[in-house]
Amino acid sequence: MSGLAAVLVVLIVALIVLVNNPPSKTVVASQTTGEALIGGPFELVDHEGRAVSNADYADRYKLFYFGFTFCPDVCPMALQIMAAALNELGPDADQIYPLFISVDPERDTVEAMGPYVKQFHDDMIGLTGTPEQIAAVTKAYRVYARKVSDPSSSAAYTMDHSSVFYFMSPDGEYVTHFTHVTDPEKMAQEIRKSMSVE
Ligand code: NI
């Protein structure tokens, strides 16, 4: 009984300490950690069938978008924004690799990726891989992607996936991110600003 009472006292003290010393520090710490944890090494296959890794893209900034070629609306819209932002950046875009990474390796073969990315921009690079490679890179970039059955479509399934652009430094550090409804001019401005600060 006294053992239990002691445990209760410890719990109550812990609660009081928590209540009195809570949020700001904790929140800032977790946000910082969250950003730092986005990204990491990867091994994939580019749209020309070459085995590539993060090391192949270490000499420039990177603008990542994760999606799939069968996506009816969100991915095409996002990739148009990406293309428009690259055009807006003009010569500054030469410091950036625009990377489209598949979340649907089953259907996004090397043959499917090349023509798809070139519809949007000549410089865009399509990356796919084995299901294991894609699982690893989506995990590293904290991208949610899940197969959902879609009987209404001839394709039989679609992918639920998070739609976010990541802008990463040459050495692969998280710099910033954009949503798929970002204005291309604003995206270009932000990117130019981050590249001049770094
Ligand atoms: Ni999509």
Image: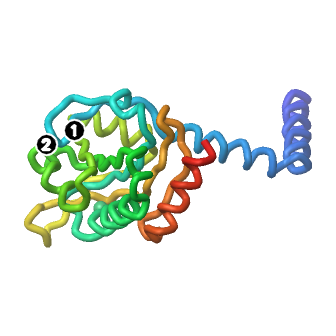
SS category of the residue bearing label 1: strand
Along the viewing direction, whichever of 185 and 71 lies nearer the viewer: 185
SS category of the residue bearing label 2: helix
- Give x and y (percent) for residue 161: 35, 57
- What's the residue type where badge 1 is placed? Asp
Q: Are marks 2 and 1 in contact (CB under 8 Å)?
A: yes
Q: Say whether residue 161 is left or right of residue 116.
A: right
Q: Is residue 12 above or below residue 53?
A: below
Quadrant holding the N terminus: top right
- Give x and y (percent) for residue 108: 16, 48
Q: Residue at x 41, y 33 (%)?
A: 59
Q: Residue at x 58, y 50 (%)?
A: 194
Residue 20 got which mark?
none
Along the viewing direction, whichever of 70 and 114 lies nearer the viewer: 114
Q: Is residue 60 above or below residue 115?
A: above
Q: Is residue 145 above or below residue 150?
A: above
Kindly identify which residue carries mark 1: 46
Q: Say whether residue 28 is left or right of residue 18.
A: left
Kindly identify which residue carries mark 2: 110
- What's the residue type where badge 2 is placed? Val
Quadrant holding the C terminus: top right
Tag 1: Cα neighbours inside 10 Å, few (<14), some, or many (≥20)? many
Along the viewing direction, whichever of 162 and 78 lies nearer the viewer: 78
Q: Say whether residue 197 is left or right of residue 20.
A: left
- Give x and y (percent) for residue 12: 88, 43
Q: Residue at x 24, y 46 (%)?
A: 126
Q: Residue at x 21, y 54 (%)?
A: 117
